[in-house]
Amino acid sequence: MARRPSPGADARLEAQLQQAIDMQVRGQVAQAIDMLRRLVPRHAAHPGLNHTLARMLIMSNKPEQAVYFLERAEAAAPDHPDVILLRASLHETAQKHADAVASYDAILARQPNHAEALAGKSRMLIELERPDEALACLERAVECEPHEPGYRVQLGVHTLENGQPHEACEILRKACALRADDPAPFASLAYALNYDHHASPEDVFKGHADYGRVVERGIPARTAFDNTPDPDRTLRVAFVSRDLKEHSVSYFFEPVLEHHDPSKLFMACYSLSRHKDAVTERLQSHADLWRDAGPLDFTQLCEQFAKDKIDIAVDLSGLGAGNRLLAFAARPTPVSLTYCGYPNTTGLSRITARLIDAITDPPPEADRLAVEQLARIDGCFLCYRPLADAPEPVPDTIGDGIVFGSFNATKKYTPQTLDAWAEMLKRVPGSKLLLKHKRMRIPDVQKHFKSAFAERGVDPERIDLRLAVDDTRGHLAVYDEIDIGLDPFPYNGTTTTCEAMWMGVPVITLAGDRHQARVGASLLHAVGLDELVADSFEGYIDTAVGLAGDHERRRALRGGMRARLASSMLCDGPGFADRFERAVRSVWRDWCANPR
């Protein structure tokens, strides 16, 4: 939320501060910071300048530099709410959640209706696992500033995380109506629509297309390129992501990077994350070029593509957090793609193609639901790299009765999914349901799920809610307790499905009418388990109940599941890298036939 400079500056400085803020709103944060730095020698003690510069440095992931300018602003105006807000932001960046709450409370003690402080406190209460208090703060923020869309966006996102996607979409539609030229509410609405069972495929497509139009309206597209339109030459491809680390995206991206043929594809990685780990180091070793691109704003990122002579830029985030779609909206390279990290169209007409497969997006009906061209990879559109230190699966589960299970994000557990799971529990006497996620440690979340099943006629004692396990081997070992994995809908799991199968657990999925509802079907087809893919709500329940009653079938599946995956196309890194290159090459050939 952009804020006008503090009063008291002379007119010229005031105008320059506002110019910097306008640049920041357009995504040109680095240029805004450069402009503000040039003002510092003449206005070193000005609180508004120091405050604005510190805020933008925080936005650019440079908190250490921000501290210097914040301290100068504090020296001039220690009790100013904007200065206290900035200190709270630094506490947030350092993950000092309780300290941030104290800063927000200091503002609210003087100004109980300070909407930004209420919203900030809400963010920290979520981190402190106090979601009900966070919701109350957000509702107050919306009441205090009913015409500010940002607070409604935050409320909508919080509502989505609480497993109420339909209600979240209604809140976010109101935010969009308040400011038709702001991409943020449209991005959040499009994202939330992926989870809404009530939204038709056409509704979901429209939400994404609306976002794309808002973004592209404010960003001019590049129209001329000097890249040589040779269909057969080595292509310079840049992958852009903040998830080039221990993250689910890397499980599927690493096989492409590790097994690529550098004579066909020169692969550059543009990492947007400050965090580095063992996975980052491994990815770096496979890349032909590595850029730490987190500090770059979208115009600088486009300039770096040009310097590196990139032919094809690949987005791995879609509308997910920390994306760089503003850069892709500027059409920085002749061809651009979106892949893997997001289950839908980006809505951007300037992205050339989206890489999927014929099961997730059956032709021709799926083509009308994407703004980009759909480029289908032969076979499954994903390749899974199993965790190297995964323990061996047990040959059979221990204990009495069937245990169904799902380790997906709680926001995927829609009311319709819970309806199906409750019916399975009723039809399989003595069965239990094990749900594991980090949010299960929150008492309010536990109460929600226990109550949800009680309302559906299932004894809450049959619902086993587990906390996330940080240790990888410990996390995977929990699959030993599960007989049958359950895929949520309409937003399927991906990593969770692959992990479950690698640990010997068969997974039941419901193939729906959109990409995110058909990923499970693609994964199961890739390992030859189409019989576990249902095509109706009733069939989903029947398939799970039938497998629950067939112990020999379950035992056979469990005993052979890891070998099945290892020998399937789902884990064939070299083969997938070749199929990936052919799909990318096909899109490039289309551009070469009409280079513009």
Image (tube, rainbow, N blue to C red):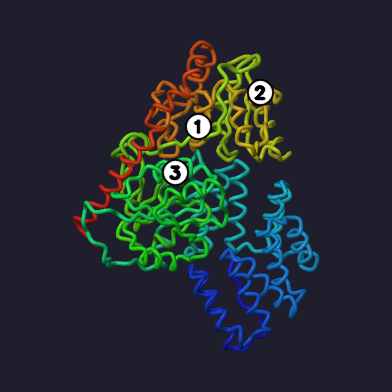
Q: Quadrant of the C terminus?
A: bottom left
- The reply to whether dot 1 and dot 2 touch (C-beta < 8 Å) is no
Q: Quadrant of the N terminus?
A: bottom right
Task: Please provide percent x and percent y for residue 250.
Answer: 48, 44
- Disc 1 or 2, which lies upstream in sequence? 2
| Residue type at the position of mark 3 | Glu
| Residue type at the position of mark 1 | Thr
- Disc 2 or 3, which lies upstream in sequence? 3
In the image: residue 264, left or right of residue 556: left
- Residue found at the far front of this picture: 285
**Foreground disc of the pair 1, 2:** 1
Q: Quadrant of residue 121?
A: bottom right
**Foreground disc of the pair 3, 1:** 3
Which circle marks residue 458 in the picture? 2
Q: What's the CA distance linking mark 1 and mark 2? A: 25 Å
Which circle marks residue 497 in the picture? 1
| Residue at 57 percent of width and 61 percent of height | 149
- The reply to whether dot 2 and dot 3 touch (C-beta < 8 Å) is no
Q: What's the CA distance linking mark 3 and mark 1? A: 18 Å
Residue 480, above or below 35: above
Q: Which residue is mark 3?
A: 254
| Label 3 residue SS | helix
Task: Please provide percent x and percent y for residue 235.
Answer: 29, 54
| Residue type at the position of mark 2 | Val
Viewer-closest of 204 and 275 = 275
Residue 549, above or below 328: above
Viewer-closest of 435 and 397 = 397
